[in-house]
């Protein structure tokens, strides 16, 4: 019997909305120039494409047979282009975005009424941060930093200088660029929390602002703006009118598509296209009275750079070909889509990706990026619903599995392609144990954001099915898998949310109940709210914001929760929404083993938790007698560190923040008979209460400078950090000798409950150049609801 999740995926893949097929191509032309940016006239008869050192004017009156009609030599590469509605004026902007740029930005206007003989009309230069142009080439806006990082100004210029003088207004740093409407009638910009629109007329200008979390994705010709919401998986449309009202939104949480900020995008009066990182585009129709909606998902070549829509919803796409060439493709979005599957190309891309991963000349992360780009270029997502052809089912399954591993991310909501690929891999080869394991892990990680309990149970059952298939195929029964297969914690008993939190924490499964990312569709009193969780300050104090989904306005958290007057507890932890059988609380917790306190939406029914941690010696301990003494508080005496006569003030300040060298000691750190000098450092609590830490660094032979000798890496490893600045909040350590060897006992305060701050620690030594865990300390925490 097919799983619930598989049925959902199949329904999505087979629907007209999410087929993700290639749009109907009606014309194409190869250009002997590496063009990237382009614009198209509203009637679709002329395309201007910006290459290196030239602008190509392409006659597309017959879209089936486009041809280059003229060329304009320019200095540099254009960032933006626009054509006037009568196809007579071309406006282009050459902007230089490099840090500490020395070249000014250039705005140029050309007469292209005869594309065969274009001529330059005028040229202006500006020392600008950003320049935007209107889609009809009627105006452009210049964003300037008047006072370095403290005062900004925007000036709008109209190309008909005789009738409309330039107008300026105070501004702020622009996130997502400037969006100028047709005729230069209005300009919009955002600083990621506030949307400002300025409307111009003969009498002057009017400025209006509204709260709008997120980043503007694109603007429509008449001034409406499509935002990528900052609180949830949603595209929101704001109308260019007094008050800047929200006129609708598009949720994409369940789509096999996630929009990008800087990928393919374009808009006509009634249609918008927005692409994701794989150039899969969503076609959005905003002509319906109910608001915008996604009508279909289409796949464009992964080497496409830019696109533009005309008024007839023909899509003009610029993509790379050879190293110096580009290709302009013309698509009919209303035409009959076709499959883009090419199994031979996919097989070759997979072979190339494997060869890339075998290389050793670059870091693994870089090689994985290269392999991912090569495999993604063959569009595996286009093969998800295509009939397997030309290669064995097992090889096809392996390709989908590797693709899923390359594109998965730490955030489950951004993994639709990985999940769909694993589903198809299992369909092709049910005996692939690794695919079952990967899919089960992915499904399990996706449980937290699911607030609907019935859906959560269905995904749990599906994850269980794949874990069992993995074990039946010879997979290893890890403690995590075994614990999950025991079933729902507290099953068969009537638990409230507080009791369920304790049961899940004790089972090591609390993360399955917690949503920590922006959560959509949180119901309360007939309304929907978004919760956005984040951290503030160097102490990473957890915080959250609540927004009303209907209008994006901020909601007061005090209207949702009753917090105690003292807020001392809200540091060095996390906030999240915890849901259980329809009940939802805000949960403050240290980690998934240590919930601290929950707050209900009603102000009553919240709970506090206590935890008791038992520490014991693990089976891999190499010095059990020593470990027993340490647990009993009878361990060896600490080695004293003597105050350094030559304090490392300058070097300490350069390497660490608010840190002081407390003393030094000469230690046989590697237990090889070659003593070295070690300094004891103390980092002050500049990052919130309890974040003080002390740790150890290696010095040179004279004890006057930090040392980066090979022994530094194992010293930091003994303290649980990598080779960079010390990155654990809280901790204390001591060196001691036992049995003729040097040991380090280190207590960590990170990610533990308040009840047991000094109980999480380990004992390590360096032997034969390697760090050895001496005591193999294990911990068992029991959580219960406080009385």
Image (cartoon, rainbow, N blue to C red):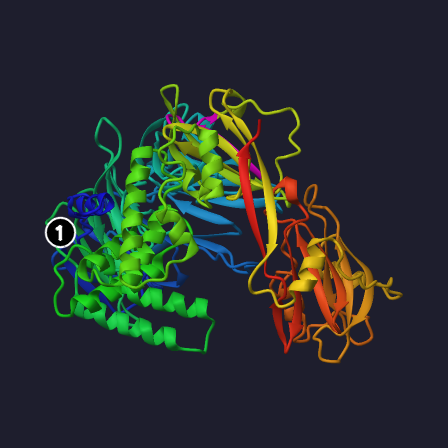
What secondary structure is marked by label 1? Answer: loop
The residue under label 1 is 337
| Residue 493, horizontal then vertical, whole percent | 38, 31
Check if residue 552 falls in the magenta segment.
yes
Residue 317 visible here: yes
In the image, residue 234 above or below residue 257 = above
- Mark 1 neighbour density, 10 Å: few (under 14) some (14–19) many (20 or more): some
| Residue 375, horizontal then vertical, whole percent | 29, 66
Q: Is residue 508 left or right of residue 417?
A: right
Viewer-side residue, 92 vs 116: 92
Residue occupying image coordinates x 47% and y 23% = 601
Viewer-side residue, 141 vs 449: 449
Would you say the magenta stretch is mainly helix, strand or loop? strand
Residue occupying image coordinates x 28% and y 53% = 466
Q: Is residue 114 left or right of residue 488?
A: left
Looking at the rendering, the stretch of residues picked out in magenta corresponds to 542-554
Check if residue 495 falls in the magenta segment.
no
The quarter of the rendered structure image containing the C terminus is top right
Residue occupying image coordinates x 36% and y 62% = 476
From this viewpoint, which residue is outermost toward the bottom? Answer: 673
Q: Quadrant of residue 233?
A: top left
Count the numbered circles shown: 1
Q: Quadrant of residue 317?
A: bottom left
Q: Is residue 144 left or right of residue 530?
A: right
Viewer-side residue, 271 vs 618: 618
């Amino acid at each position: 019997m097919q799983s619930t999740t598989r049925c959902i995926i199949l329904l999505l893949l087979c629907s007209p909305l999410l087929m993700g097929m290639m749009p109907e191509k009606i014309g194409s032309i190869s250009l002997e120039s590496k063009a990237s940016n382009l614009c198209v006239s509203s009637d679709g008869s002329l395309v201007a494409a910006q290459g290196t050192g030239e602008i190509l004017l392409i006659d597309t009156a017959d879209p089936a047979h486009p041809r280059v009609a003229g060329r304009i030599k320019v200095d540099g590469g254009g960032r933006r282009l626009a054509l006037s509605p009568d196809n007579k004026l071309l406006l282009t902007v050459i902007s230089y975005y490099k840090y500490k740029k020395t070249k000014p930005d250039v705005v140029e206007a050309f007469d292209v009424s005869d594309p065969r003989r274009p001529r330059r009309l005028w040229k202006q230069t500006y020392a600008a941060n950003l320049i935007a142009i209107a889609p009809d080439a009627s105006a452009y806006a210049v964003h300037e930093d008047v006072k370095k990082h403290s005062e900004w100004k925007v000036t709008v210029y109209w190309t008909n200088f005789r009738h409309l003088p330039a107008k300026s207004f105070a501004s702020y740093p622009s996130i997502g660029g400037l969006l100028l409407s047709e005729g230069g009638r209005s300009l919009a910009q955002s600083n990621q929390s506030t949307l400002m629109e300025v409307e111009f007329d003969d009498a002057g200008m009017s400025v209006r602002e509204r709260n709008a979390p997120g980043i503007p994705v694109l603007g429509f010709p008449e001034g409406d703006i499509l935002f990528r919401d900052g609180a949830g998986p949603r595209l929101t449309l704001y109308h260019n009118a007094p008050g800047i009202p929200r006129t609708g939104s598009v949720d994409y949480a369940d789509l096999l598509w996630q929009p990008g900020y800087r990928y393919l995008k374009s808009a006509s009066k009634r249609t918008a296209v927005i692409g994701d990182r794989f150039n899969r585009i969503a076609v959005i129709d905003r002509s319906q009275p109910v608001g915008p909606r996604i009508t279909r998902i289409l796949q464009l070549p992964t080497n496409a750079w830019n696109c533009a829509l005309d008024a007839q919803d023909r899509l003009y796409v610029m993509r790379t070909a050879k190293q110096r060439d580009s290709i302009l493709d013309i698509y009919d979005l209303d035409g009959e889509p076709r499959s883009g599957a090419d199994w031979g190309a996919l097989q070759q891309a997979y072979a190339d990706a494997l060869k890339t991963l075998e290389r050793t000349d670059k870091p693994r992360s870089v090689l994985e990026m290269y392999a991912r780009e090569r495999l993604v270029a063959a569009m595996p997502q286009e093969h998800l619903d295509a009939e397997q052809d030309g290669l064995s089912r097992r090889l096809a399954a392996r390709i989908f599995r590797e693709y899923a591993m390359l594109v998965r991310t730490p955030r489950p909501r951004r993994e639709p392609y990985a999940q769909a690929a694993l589903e198809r891999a299992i369909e092709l080869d049910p005996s692939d144990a690794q695919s079952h394991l990967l899919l089960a892990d992915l499904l399990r990680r996706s449980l937290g954001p699911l607030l609907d309990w019935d859906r959560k149970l269905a995904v749990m059952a599906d994850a269980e099915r794949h874990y069992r298939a993995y074990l039946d195929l010879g997979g290893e029964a890890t403690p995590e898998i075994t614990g999950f297969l025991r079933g729902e914690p507290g099953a068969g008993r009537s638990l409230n949310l507080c009791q369920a939190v304790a049961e899940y924490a004790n089972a090591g499964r609390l993360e399955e109940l917690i949503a920590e990312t922006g959560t959509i569709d949180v119901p309360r009193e007939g309304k929907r709210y978004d919760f956005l969780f984040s951290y503030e300050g160097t102490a990473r104090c957890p915080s959250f914001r609540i927004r009303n989904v209907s209008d994006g306005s901020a909601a007061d958290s005090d209207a949702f929760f009753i917090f105690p007057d003292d807020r001392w507890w809200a540091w060095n932890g996390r906030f999240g929404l915890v849901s259980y059988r329809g009940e939802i609380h805000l949960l403050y917790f240290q980690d998934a083993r240590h919930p601290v306190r929950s707050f209900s939406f009603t102000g009553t029914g919240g709970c506090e938790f206590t935890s008791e941690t038992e520490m014991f010696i693990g089976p891999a301990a190499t010095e059990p007698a020593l470990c027993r003494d340490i647990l009993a508080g009878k361990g060896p005496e600490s080695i004293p560190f003597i105050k350094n006569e030559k304090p490392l003030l300058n070097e300490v300040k350069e390497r660490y923040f608010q840190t002081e060298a407390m003393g030094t000691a000469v230690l046989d750190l590697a237990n090889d008979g070659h003593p070295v000098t070690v300094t004891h450092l103390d980092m002050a609590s500049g990052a919130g209460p309890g974040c003080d830490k002390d740790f150890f660094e290696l010095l040179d032979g004279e004890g006057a400078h930090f040392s980066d000798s090979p022994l530094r890496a194992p010293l930091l490893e003994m303290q649980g950090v990598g080779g960079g600045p010390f990155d654990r909040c809280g901790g204390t350590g001591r060196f001691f000798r036992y049995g003729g060897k040097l040991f380090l006992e280190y207590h960590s305060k990170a990610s533990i409950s308040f009840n047991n701050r000094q109980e999480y620690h380990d004992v390590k030594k360096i032997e034969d150049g390697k760090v050895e865990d001496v005591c193999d300390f294990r911990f068992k925490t029991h959580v219960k609801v406080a009385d």
